[in-house]
Image (cartoon, rainbow, N blue to C red):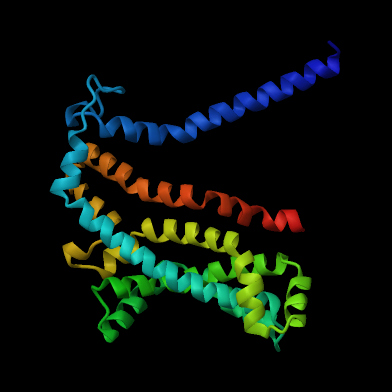
């Protein structure tokens, strides 16, 4: 074995060892949460591994906290936001990416400037605005409050995706007799499924995990989404870690399902720009 081969193997081994250690460190919180969810309350900080696995915490969270109701509320709000964001960002992304009109780039940068505004800065104005519209303490108002910055970010993604598609496809569609809408509907929209899947996954995760707006704009307990509902186990003087861990694990399941259903399109959407330059 030459010195070069030995150094190369050592470098590869060191890289894999570093990645393994990094993966272990990053996955430890999830492992701790899984272990905590199947422990009795008295063993949370006294036993690293449970003496006996129990699923009573999941049953307690599912029934006592009425978790199906809050999961349904989150699904409703997420579906509302995703429909609005996908439709709006797909049309806006196509317009900014494929159509020519005066000051297109300037308008695009003004449009996506909403991404630079932190949610905390618009919390009080949004509260007053929803109150004036009669949408405060409603799931529709909560969903609409999440669409502002979300549409800007999704439009940014869809514009990049549409710009990566060959312009010759649109020219061929116009030669076949399609107008601008026909080119979008029959040529570019079917090819934009990876980009749409990427937007859906990002938007679903962002809406599902949103906490600040959900806590501020919703007061009725039966209308709360999953994250504020789980926060109820955080008391002033004590925290029910077993119930919180079990609830968080159940809350992760819908995100995993959405990602598994759309992972192929998601990977295509994330790598489209790199493959097409």
Coordinates of residue 254 in the picture (x, y in percent):
37, 50
Image side of residue 261 versus residue 268, left or right: left
Image side of residue 131 versus residue 253, left or right: left
> Furthest residue to the top?
1
**Residue plotted at (71% across, 69% down):** 163
Coordinates of residue 156 in the picture (x, y in percent):
60, 69
Coordinates of residue 245 in the picture (x, y in percent):
28, 40
**Residue 228 visible somewhere in the drawing:** no
**Residue plotted at (67% across, 23% down):** 14
Q: Is residue 124 above or below residue 223?
A: below
The one nearer the camera, 270 or 123, is 270
> Furthest residue to the left?
64
Specify the quadrant that holds the C terminus.
Answer: bottom right
> Furthest residue to the front?
176
**Residue 48 visible somewhere in the drawing:** yes
The one nearer the camera, 104 or 175, is 175
Image side of residue 146 versus residue 272, left or right: left
**Residue plotted at (40% across, 69% down):** 81
Image side of residue 276 versus residue 221, left or right: right
Coordinates of residue 186 in the picture (x, y in percent):
63, 74
């Amino acid at each position: 074995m030459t010195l070069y081969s030995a150094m190369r193997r050592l470098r590869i081994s060191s890289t894999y060892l570093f990645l393994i250690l990094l993966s272990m460190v990053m996955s430890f919180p999830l492992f701790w949460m899984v272990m905590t969810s199947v422990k009795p309350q008295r063993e949370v900080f006294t036993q690293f591994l449970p003496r006996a696995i129990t699923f009573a915490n999941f049953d307690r969270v599912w029934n006592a906290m009425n978790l199906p109701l809050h999961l349904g509320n989150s699904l409703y709000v997420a579906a509302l936001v995703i429909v609005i964001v996908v439709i709006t960002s797909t049309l806006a992304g196509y317009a900014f990416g494929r159509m020519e009109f005066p000051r297109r780039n300037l308008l695009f940068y003004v449009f996506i400037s909403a991404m630079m505004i932190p949610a905390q800065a618009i919390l009080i104005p949004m509260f007053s605005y929803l109150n004036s519209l009669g949408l405060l303490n409603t799931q529709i108002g909560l969903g609409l409050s999440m669409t502002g910055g979300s549409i800007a970010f999704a439009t940014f993604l869809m514009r990049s995706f549409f710009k990566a598609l060959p312009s010759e496809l649109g020219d061929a569609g116009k030669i076949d007799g399609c107008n601008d809408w026909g080119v979008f509907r029959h040529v570019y929209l079917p090819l934009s499924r990876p980009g749409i899947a990427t937007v859906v996954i990002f938007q679903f995760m962002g809406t599902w995990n949103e906490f600040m707006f959900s806590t501020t704009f919703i007061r009725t307990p039966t209308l709360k989404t999953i994250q504020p509902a789980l926060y109820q186990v955080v008391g002033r003087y004590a925290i029910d870690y077993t119930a919180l861990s079990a609830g968080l694990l159940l809350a992760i399941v819908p995100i995993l399902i959405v990602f598994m259903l759309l992972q192929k399109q998601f990977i295509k959407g994330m790598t489209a720009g790199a493959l097409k330059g």
